[in-house]
């Protein structure tokens, strides 16, 4: 779904001295043997990709392989102490401990609870507000979008203030004295709402862009045939919007735990009583608080396989179920 | 009217925490616990208080440097890679492109430990360079620019090649001037991301006085209930981004929307 190959292009040829490592001067290319020229020609695109690719290999794929290796070792992160090979012991421990299952469960709850913010409300808002245009639309857009720009740590600070048990606005308005972030029954809810506040405006924009991209002729034709507004929405608009919806779902699944990390780290540190420890926070906890690098690496590998499976399923679904307006 | 009502309610809900952040920051220190919706009389004493406790100017300078260097580096590497993907067809092209997309499946937390030890070996731990270098490639940047360059008229590339210009010259004299709006939008997006980044700086920099997000966090830990200065510092941490947004609103929104649509 992500990859579309470019149509065939007659490549611009790298003649100049700046592209080929062997280019001795700017105007000598006619003298260069044809074979060397062809070779240079073939190498050129790789030279352009190289800087990004090298960074990718060094900072993403190399560490990924190392993490995979590390998951078969026991190591406490100290440079002076050797890593001891332990075979599959880390994975065995991981599946025996309740932590992994619990944190995966909390991650699933988190993702499901975020879907209303990233899909349901944005679609409702998008459908209800299609006729709003012009200057007013720009102002509304700016307002719902603003939270996306707030730095996570700053949003942690202001929400801590809003949720303050004694003098926070939330308790004053609700007339309660709940200690939202220090109560294991409400801490996860608080994290969900704050994350939802961050992503809602972004999702609204994406949905609005998706709706704006739908050709109005279909709805007009259906209306001429006597379809009602809700029929048009259900049978035409939503199916045509489905690629956008699948994209938002994919993003929620892949990024939600990532979005919540700074909030959890600054507000609850995974607590109280692990109530906000999701899978990402567990990884962090194993490696940098319990200094159990092998266990952290093993958990990382399990997570990677899990997310790979979910993403593959969603891409497959989107290819099967979505309609494209070609 | 219904649309206006829905959007107005949603907009107010979204903006309220931001409003309250600045309202608290601008109250007089003795009024911090006031629930008066208008911060009146206003005062900058909270800002002064925050500035006395942390080096606000130093934090801002460091954060700006890190964010600018990260964004520029990402823009450059993404431009070169996206140009290659859009202008040529070459063996393993699809595979290489998938390697970029595939990074989205690799959460940061999975690679952090080896990256941390590599920075240690390179002697970049605790340096601003250590924050920037591992982030110089943005898969999102490659993806977005490639989409733009794919729709770039190939005839122009061919014409440029026939004029005898090298691909390098073509990139800078033909392609870049024509996709300047896309480059501008992407660079703003990358800058905002880099400015707001928390996770990696928190790992690399032990000093809490290095970038604004960490300075803010250290403030939260030690003086969690000193709401006035805390809100002032949080407000300052967001101020450059909000200022940028107010000036360049349309471009920023477009950049985000495009980043969302494949």
Image: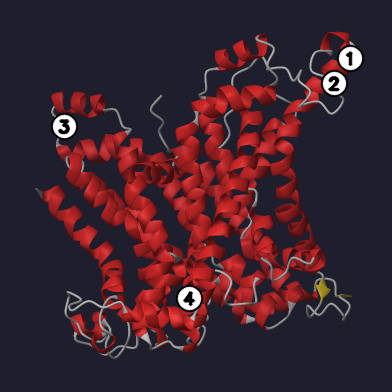
Would you name the residue on which mark 1 appears? A35
Nearer the N terminus, badge 3 or badge 2?
A: 2
Q: Nearer the viewer, mark 3 or mark 4?
A: 4
Residue A251: give x, y in percent of width and height.
Answer: 48, 52
Q: Taking A77 as reference, is B53 left or right?
A: left
For the residues labelled 3 and 4, the Cα–Cα distance comes to 56 Å
Q: Taking A311 as reference, is B246 left or right?
A: left
For the residues labelled 1 and 2, the Cα–Cα distance comes to 6 Å
**Helix, strand, or loop for circle 3?**
loop
Q: Taking B90 as reference, is A211 left or right?
A: left
Residue at 54% across, 70% down? B58
Q: Are marks 1 and 2 in contact (CB under 8 Å)?
A: yes
For the residues labelled 4 and 2, the Cα–Cα distance comes to 54 Å
Would you name the residue on which mark 2 appears? A39
Would you name the residue on which mark 3 appears? A227
Would you name the residue on which mark 4 appears? B216
**Helix, strand, or loop for circle 1?**
helix
Q: Is residue A155 above or below residue A305?
A: below
Q: Residues within 10 Å of mark 4 (few under 14, many from 20)?
A: many
Q: Is residue B133 visible?
A: yes
Q: Is residue A115 visible?
A: no
């Amino acid at each position: 779904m992500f990859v579309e190959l470019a149509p065939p292009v007659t490549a611009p040829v790298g003649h100049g001295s700046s592209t080929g490592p062997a280019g001795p001067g700017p105007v000598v290319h006619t003298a260069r043997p044809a074979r060397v020229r062809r070779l240079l020609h073939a190498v050129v695109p790789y030279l352009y990709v190289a800087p990004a690719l090298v960074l990718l290999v060094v900072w993403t794929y190399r560490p990924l392989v190392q993490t995979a290796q590390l998951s078969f070792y026991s190591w406490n992160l100290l440079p002076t102490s050797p890593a001891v090979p332990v075979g599959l012991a880390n994975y065995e421990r991981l599946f025996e401990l309740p932590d992994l299952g619990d944190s995966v469960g909390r991650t699933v709850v988190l993702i499901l609870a975020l879907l209303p913010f990233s899909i349901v409300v944005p679609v409702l808002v998008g459908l209800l507000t299609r006729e709003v245009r012009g200057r007013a639309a720009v102002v509304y857009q700016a307002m719902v979008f603003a939270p996306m720009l707030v730095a996570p740590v700053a949003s942690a600070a202001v929400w801590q203030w809003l949720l303050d048990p004694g003098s926070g606005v939330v308790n004053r308005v609700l007339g309660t004295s709940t200690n939202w972030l220090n109560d294991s029954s409400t801490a996860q809810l608080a994290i969900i709402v704050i994350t939802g506040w961050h992503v809602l405006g972004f999702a609204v924009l994406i949905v609005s862009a998706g709706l704006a991209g739908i050709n109005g002729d279909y709805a007009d034709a259906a209306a001429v045939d006597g379809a009602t507004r809700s029929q048009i929405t259900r049978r035409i608009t939503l199916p045509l919007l489905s690629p956008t919806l699948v994209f938002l779902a994919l993003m929620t699944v892949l990024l939600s735990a990532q979005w919540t990390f700074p909030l959890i780290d600054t507000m609850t540190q995974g607590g109280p009583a692990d109530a906000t420890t999701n899978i990402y926070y567990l990884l962090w906890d194993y490696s940098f608080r319990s200094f159990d690098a092998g266990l952290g690496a093993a958990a990382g590998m399990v997570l990677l396989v899990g997310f790979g499976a979910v993403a593959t399923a969603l891409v497959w679904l989107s290819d099967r179920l979505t309609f494209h307006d070609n | 009217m219904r649309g206006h009502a829905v959007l107005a309610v949603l907009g107010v809900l979204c903006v309220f925490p931001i409003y309250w952040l600045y309202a608290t920051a601008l109250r007089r220190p003795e009024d911090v616990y006031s629930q008066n919706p208008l911060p009146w009389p206003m005062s900058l004493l909270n800002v002064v208080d925050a500035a006395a406790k942390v080096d606000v100017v130093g934090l801002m300078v460091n954060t700006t440097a890190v964010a600018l260097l990260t964004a520029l580096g990402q823009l450059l590497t993404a431009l070169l890679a996206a140009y290659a993907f859009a202008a040529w067809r070459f063996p393993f092209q699809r595979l290489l492109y998938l390697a970029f997309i595939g990074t989205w499946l690799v959460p940061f937390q999975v690679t952090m430990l080896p990256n941390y030890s590599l920075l240690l070996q390179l002697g970049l731990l605790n340096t601003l360079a250590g924050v920037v270098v591992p982030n110089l490639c943005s898969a999102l940047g490659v993806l977005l620019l490639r989409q733009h360059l794919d729709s770039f008229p190939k005839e122009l590339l061919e014409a440029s090649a026939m004029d005898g210009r090298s691909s390098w010259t073509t990139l800078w004299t033909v392609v870049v001037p024509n996709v300047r709006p896309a480059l501008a939008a992407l660079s703003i997006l990358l800058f905002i991301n880099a400015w707001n980044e928390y996770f990696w700086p928190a790992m690399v920099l032990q000093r809490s006085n290095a970038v604004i997000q960490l300075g803010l966090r250290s403030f939260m830990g030690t003086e969690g209930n000193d709401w006035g200065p805390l809100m002032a510092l949080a407000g300052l941490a967001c101020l450059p981004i909000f200022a940028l947004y107010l000036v360049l609103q349309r471009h920023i929104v477009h950049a985000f929307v495009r980043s969302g649509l494949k």
